[in-house]
Image: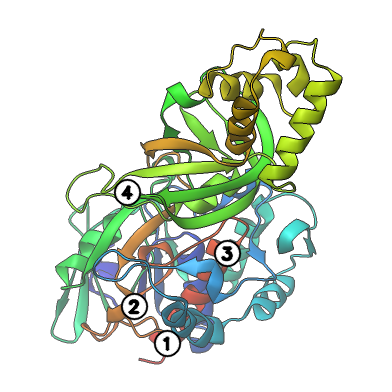
Amino acid sequence: MQEEKRKQWKIIIVGGGASGMMAAISSARTLGKGNKILLLEKNELLGKKLLATGNGRCNFMNIYCAASDLKGKEEDGIYSDEKKIEQFFSHGALSQLSVEETRQLFFQMGILSRVEGEGRVYPYSGQGIVIKEALEAEIKRLGVCIRSSSNVQNVKKQKDSFEVEMDNGECLFSSNVILATGGKAGLQYGSTGDGFAFAKSFGHQIMKPIPALVQLLCDKKSFGGCKGVRAKGKVSLLRENKVLATDIGEIQFTEEGVSGICVFNISRYVRFDKLEDRLEEKYSVEIDLFPEWSKDELFTILTEKQKREGKEAIDSLLKGMIHEKLGAALLNRVEIKKEEIASMIAASKMEELSHLMKHWNIKINGTKSFKDAQVTCGGISTSEINPTTMESLLVPGLFFAGELIDIDGRCGGYNLQWAWSSGYGAGKAASKE
């Protein structure tokens, strides 16, 4: 141990998640055997969060991944435009490790893969653990030194060398440091945001980290009694009645709000107060339960059913169109009693009902916590990072990778592609310093 305390490493990688493991592989392949690379992970195992990805199947990339699937924030909290992300991702990180190169790299490590719906790529075996095992085996084969259950307390620079302080009082020294600690999403996997504090100590600006790809908490009065219902539809996130994001898919109604992949995707555009964990402005989610039909077409369908089945109660009339619990919630919203006879309901009320089926607006009170989030929105400002090398523009020899950086993506393998590409770029560049 005394000898290792005095040892000068070429690269110390802090964080053994997806981006950190890829950084280790990239740097070791560049430097070769005897590479003097140390990978530190505070959990007892590498890649702990990877094991939960894709419900254990590990959707580890997406063949359609492009800059338009990712975003970040500008300094005023407004989301980065596509041109900026294009420069940072497509012409930066992705130029170091493209989508096809990523799939080929995993193939070289023994992973056969299959492409499923919407371009999602999974291990052919259907077992997500093989991704983690392949990465770890490659890291060991390349001779990288791995230290798990190793908690970093601080990182600082002394002249031309970095000093990494451990929680046991030990100090490690390195020419270069790659911070790949992850964000704050998935607290149960050890993601506590340590890297943000390290980056901030070097003078980096941190865009406020908030939960993303997460369930939206809503006003229960709007959808009471709908818990457990799933419905296909279109969801839109509105801020002050302006549409910020839209997606289509299966909407899941929970006790506290709405969930599902399409909801997760629009949750990335919710903003919180810079100082407090509360919404900055008024947000709502608008649900279109019938995206294939226009409001006028729905009105025609309803009135024709009203003529044909007029002696039935209105809730019976809605059967065959919508889940009965959703129907009850909509009727309550337009103040129609479910037992009312269909033929007795005024055309104006049927008009109101058809409008609500297309524009069901529900107030958002917030989101679930980082524990429930799949990814972090926010992080180290991309304006302070070289987009190709992932090196700090403030501190030479300091590199970043993965979720720590202010870039987040849609559900479906996009965030892991960012982890692979940014980690690969950081490792490659750090090995040349």
Is residue 161 left or right of 248 when viewed as pictured? Answer: left
Query: x, y (%) of residue 216?
Result: 45, 39
Left or right of 409 in this view: 270 = left
Looking at numbered disc 4 in the image, what kind of residue is underneath it? Answer: Thr
The mark nearer the N terminus, 2 or 3, is 2
**Nearest to viewer (mark 3 / mark 1):** 3
For marks 3 and 1 on the same chain, the one whose residue lies earlier in the sequence: 3
Compare residues 203 and 73 and report the one nearer the observer. Answer: 73
Q: Where residue 264 sits in the image (x, y, percent)?
A: 52, 47
The type of residue carrying mark 3 is: Tyr
Secondary structure, mark 2, is: strand
Q: Can residue 420 be seen in this view?
A: no
Q: Are marks 2 and 4 in contact (CB under 8 Å)?
A: no
Task: Provide the residue designation for mark 4.
Answer: 192
The span from disc 4 to disc 1 (Cα, nearest Å) is: 27 Å
Front residue of 92 and 161: 92
Q: Which residue matches tag 1?
A: 429
Q: In this figure, which residue is indicated by the disc labeled 2?
A: 399
Residue at image mark 3: 414
Q: Which of marks 4 and 1 is nearer the N terminus?
A: 4
